[in-house]
Image: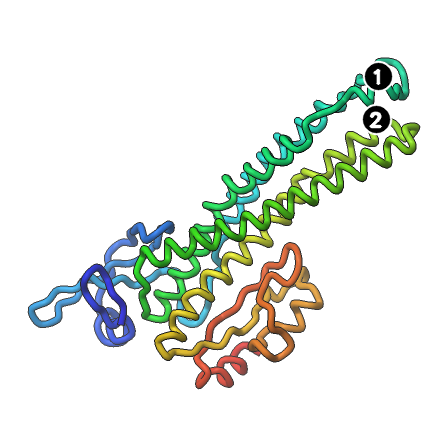
Amino acid sequence: MCRIGQKLVDFVKIVKTKCQDSKPMKPVVIQKGWSKVRVYECPLKRGDNEYMTYIVAWYVGKKRMRRGFASLEFAKRELNRIHKEARATLLDLFPANLYGDAVFDEDTFNSVKPDWSALYDAIQAQYRRELTPIIGFVFAESAENLELTRAFAVADDIVTDSSENWARRWIQTLATDMTQTDQRQIDRYIAEYRADPEVGLEWLRERLGRIVSPSRAEMVASTEITRANYEGEAFIANQLRNEGIDLVAVWFTAVDERVCPICGANHNKPRGEGWQLPPPAHPRCRCWVNWVEPQFLPEYLRDNE
């Protein structure tokens, strides 16, 4: 049973008995929490009550469509923008003509005394401000997808609050870790340059540019979208467990040439058979889990061998 507005609707029965003979209307988009859900509307008459049934267009049989692609691209774009600004700030501190015609001038180099603390705080604040809503959106989207496929509903405000709270907590930790990594790398490159200034100022500028590069933005974005996808679904799985409905998490990979040995060994295996910690297993991990009822698990694993 699933609640649509104030109505309780039996999704499974409707799909099997009523809507299979009905011609669905055109797809529409409805706002649910932070996410927009693409659905087909199918009217249904039951006695004196008329229900509006929502048939989700994102799933076809047992085949799961890839989710989060748009969010991934958006996260990469926002991180690239943050990194571009940070890279410009770093390179402006050490312009190519810092020493004029000289190879190195210690007094000039020592005169460059930026407020590193303020710089790191600004970068961290940008990470939190830009990433929190994106990651929260993916959490909510994944939670709602699992709700719809399991004919189960959690109040929108609970899903929204949970997604916001999780995103806020996790991005605080992530932003702190990323900024500390930035700081350690900047300190190391500057120390190496001071120890051997003959490598040239361009060497330092190139190393500083690596710290906040597009490749790093892509790595962080893909890793965190994978994490948020799992966390959103795990939230609904826990809600189902509280209602007495257990689901088993089964690890899945893209089954392509980019799958690593770690994830490849986990493919189509339930939790406890070779893995305990969920995706992401490593940076740029693209894996996900499917949620299966225990009584259907043997057949499900055979079908996906």
Q: Position of residue 267 (x, y in %)?
A: 61, 72
Horizontal and vertical percent for residue 301?
A: 53, 80
Label 2: few (<14), some or many (≥20) within 10 Å? some
- Residue 24 pos. (x, y %): 25, 61
Q: Amino acid at mark 1?
A: Tyr
**Closer to us: 121 or 259:** 121
Viewer-side residue, 79 vs 155: 155
- Please identify the quarter of the rendering in which residue 205 is found: top right
Q: Residue furthest toward the top? A: 100
Local secondary structure at mark 1: loop
C-beta proximity under 8 Å, tags 1 and 2:
yes
Position of 99 with respect to 152 (left or right) is right
Residue at horizontal 12%, vertical 71%?
A: 46
Q: Which of the image's four quarters has the N terminus?
A: bottom left
Q: Compared with residue 145, is residue 122 higher up or lower down, i.e. above or below?
A: above
Q: Amino acid at mark 2?
A: Leu
x, y percentage for residue 84? 63, 32
Q: Which residue is mark 1?
A: 99
Q: Is residue 263 left or right of residue 150?
A: right
Left or right side of 196 for 62: left
Looking at the image, residue 262 lies above or below residue 112: below
Q: Earlier in the sequence, mark 1 or mark 2?
A: 1
